[in-house]
Amino acid sequence: MKLDFDSIIIGAGVSGMTSAIYLKRAGINFLLLEQNYPGGQLNRADKVKNYPGIVEIDGPSLVMNMVNQLNELDININYEQVIDIEDKIEYKIVHTNKKDYTTKTVLLTTGRIPRELGLENEKSLIGKGISWCASCDGNFYKEKSVAVVGGGNTAIGDATYLSNICKKVYVINRTDHFRADAGILDKAKEKDNICFITNRIVTKLNIQDEKLSSIELDNGEIIELSGLFEAIGSIPNINYLKSISLVTDNNYIIVDKDLKTSVDGIYASGDAIKKDLYQIVTATGEGALAANSIINYLN
């Protein structure tokens, strides 16, 4: 049976794009699939200062550099949603919303998706006041009041970014301890229009004219605002894995030192795997290692 591809990469994030570069240079017949847009959560990063060789760059610009490199190598990204994967032992079938593909190997690089608050009306307010990307949607709230939920680097970085656009920025953290790095937190505290609210959680989203109008906290306080940016962490994006049973830990895919999963011929890299450090540089390294493992497997 002639297969469509030797390998299919699912996800054009940092790790997926790195793997694509290595597979292309090795002459492997592969397909790169992406559901939304390349770069994944890196597009949410206001500033990147820990990527070797680049002193400082914003996330979207770094993503564009990677995409341009793909273009120079004639690597195309197929924008399709993967619905399921079937393991036929000798080969795999990748089902998308457009087509079915057969392949010898699969690389899972779908990363993580933002965690939701789980509140009533939350999903209906997406794009109408609820967002997970300050750099993407911040300009929609120019000179308006917004809030950021969370206490990590992303949340505090988002708040600082929004403070340059919005009239007022509330940072709501469920404890009085912030997980953000000291330098990032100190920079945010220098902003006069950022108000820190600690030991509180958002319990209700209020709507007016089909848009977010205010939020209610667990102490009954109501804060009028136009936008709420959620930065409370992420969860692995593996909901499409319906027909194969990978070994996971808290939904993170378990891989060995060669990035092999528990299913022969299926590999995983990037933020969807169980590991100790989730950084851009680790994602690129894993992408290269996974590609090399696939090349060895095919040979």
Image (tube, rainbow, N blue to C red):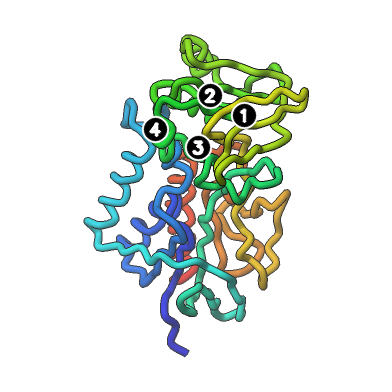
Find disc 4 in the rendering and name its residue.
Answer: 51
Sequence-first disc among 4 and 2: 4
Q: CA distance from mark 1 to mark 3?
A: 19 Å
Sequence-first disc among 4 and 1: 4
Give the class, few, some or many, for how many residues have Cα within 10 Å of label 2's Cα (few <14, many ≥20): many
Q: CA distance from mark 4 to mark 2?
A: 20 Å
Q: Nearer the viewer, mark 4 or mark 2?
A: 2
Give the class, few, some or many, for how many residues have Cα within 10 Å of label 1's Cα (few <14, many ≥20): many
Sequence-first disc among 2 and 1: 1
46 or 4, which lies in front? Answer: 46
Q: Kindly identify the amino acid type of the residue bearing the numbered disc 4.
A: Tyr
Above or below 45: residue 160: above
Q: Nearer the viewer, mark 1 or mark 3?
A: 1
Q: Residue at x 46, y 71 (%)?
A: 298
Q: CA distance from mark 4 to mark 3?
A: 9 Å
Find disc 3 in the rendering and name its residue.
Answer: 279
Q: Residue at x 42, y 51 (%)?
A: 288
Find disc 2 in the rendering and name its residue.
Answer: 156
Sequence-first disc among 2 and 3: 2
Q: CA distance from mark 2 to mark 1?
A: 8 Å
Please tell me whether mark 4 sits on a helix, a strand or a loop. Answer: loop
Find disc 1 in the rendering and name its residue.
Answer: 150
Asked if disc 2 and disc 1 are in contact, CB closer than 8 Å, the reply is: yes
Sequence-first disc among 1 and 3: 1
Q: Nearer the viewer, mark 4 or mark 1?
A: 1
Task: Give the residue at the far front of this rendering.
Answer: 209
Q: Is residue 24 left or right of residue 194?
A: left
Q: Residue at x 26, y 51 (%)?
A: 68
Q: Kindly identify the amino acid type of the residue bearing the numbered disc 3.
A: Gln
